[in-house]
Amino acid sequence: VTSPDPDIVEFGRKAETLIQALADCSEEPTRLIRKFLSPEHRRAADLVQAWMSDAGMTVTQDALATLRGHYNPSNASKLVLCGSHIDTVIDAGRYDGNFGVVAGILAVDEIRRRGIDLPFGLEILAFGDEEGVRFPTTLGSSSAIAGLVNDEVLSLVDDDGISMRQALMEFGADPSAFRNIVYRPEDLLAYLEVHIEQGPVLEAQGYPVGVVTSIAGHARHMITVKGVAGHAGTVPMTLRRDALTAASKIILDIEQLARDNQAHAMVATIGRLELLPGASNVIPNEVTFSVDLRAASDAPRIAATAEIERICAQIEANRGVQVTLAQDHAGDTTACSEPIQDHIAGAISDIGLTPFRLPSGAGHDGQSLAKITDIGMIFVRCRDGISHNPAEHASMDDMGYAVAALVGTLERMGRHYSASS
Ligand SMILES: [Zn+2]
């Protein structure tokens, strides 16, 4: 492993400085908490706005308080968007979302410094609401600019009964401008996002950055197993209809199913389980558990759901229990554009690294943007795969590589677009 060149080291150093400044914008001194439209969000947005201006961008704030830093030296008509979110979960890490915004700003700064002429405008977006911590939304800011929600979201209230409309006005945004929030697909060329991986794959494989192939689709099922309660001392093992042991067999079979589908990056998680009656001397008669199922594409995930139904029917027959499966949530896989993946891969090769490709198991703003334009994502290795946790960490060199890869991707997209238009 050679050490990165001085430009990359410098990108990483700058990124870390900006990320630390954002991390200081927190509701509490010892934990990072930055909710949508909070005073901490305002302070962070003011920093981002100043950095965008310093990098040569014209900054506006839309109806949902997304900062849009516009850079367009050639006055081109089409835009490439690049962004991420600056809200955090409770007791968050410093890099999730925030690094994507910082990377976009540093990329524009570099493009201006080097006088790189791009045949499209750039708009760096700092979304205020991705995590959905304050209001009951998911991917709130990005789904609004993609036209996926209407202005009813403004009436959502937080735990203190404050509406989003009121919070936006206190923040200094103009919710009445909501009708202007949506980008027109014909004005866009692409949406790019740099994000920490939030998983352990890049670290395990030894790659600082990676090319994201898709954002995994997911399904959430609730499975209920009903057996017969009985005295733990009197009912012989052969005469039991134990809901928990039946559920355990189903759970282990689901684990095996996911392990057998590694070619599709399938993961299955039982994260919640409740059993009744819940006494140490009573055979459980009812168990309910969740199954979170994800894969890099839809067909294997749908096939796996059918297989889970078959597993349930088999256990039902073998163990004399009743099993019901209900799907309570599903979302399709979002593919990243293959030409953009190739531009990113080329840019990663240009800085002397191997362009490793991987799917994203976590959700991202790109899922919204993919409804209106092509998307591409660059992942950055994070230590031990930890995220949504104060131990979250990306190294300065890795962040430097990601910024360089973003600049290179934009240059490659620029050459490609010039040649094809
Ligand atoms: Zn994030």
Image (cartoon, rainbow, N blue to C red):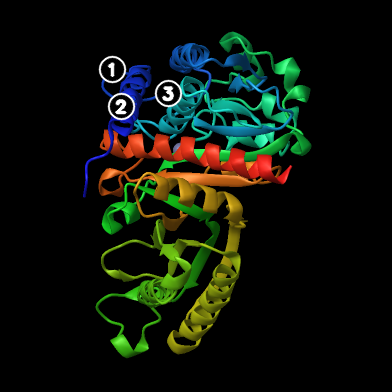
Mark 1 crowdedness (10 Å alpha carbons): few <14, some 14-19, many ≥20: few
Quick one: quadrant of the C terminus? Answer: top right
Please determine whether, in this image, residue 177 is positioned above or below residue 354.
Answer: above
**Which is nearer the N-term, disc 3 or disc 1?**
1
Residue at label 3? Answer: 34
Choose between 252 and 324: the one closer to the eye: 252
Number of the label disc, if any, that sits on residue 29 = 1
Q: Position of residue 277 (x, y in %)?
A: 38, 62
Say whether residue 204 is left or right of residue 162. Answer: left
Disc 2/disc 1 C-alpha distance (Å)? 28 Å
Label 2: which secondary element: helix
**Which is nearer the N-term, disc 2 or disc 1?**
2
Choose between 401 and 263: the one closer to the eye: 401
Q: Amino acid at mark 1?
A: Pro
Asked whether mark 1 and ligand 1 are closer than 8 Å, the reply comes as no
Choose between 385 and 302: the one closer to the eye: 385
Disc 3/disc 1 C-alpha distance (Å)? 11 Å
Label 1: which secondary element: loop
Q: Position of residue 420 (x, y in %)?
A: 71, 46
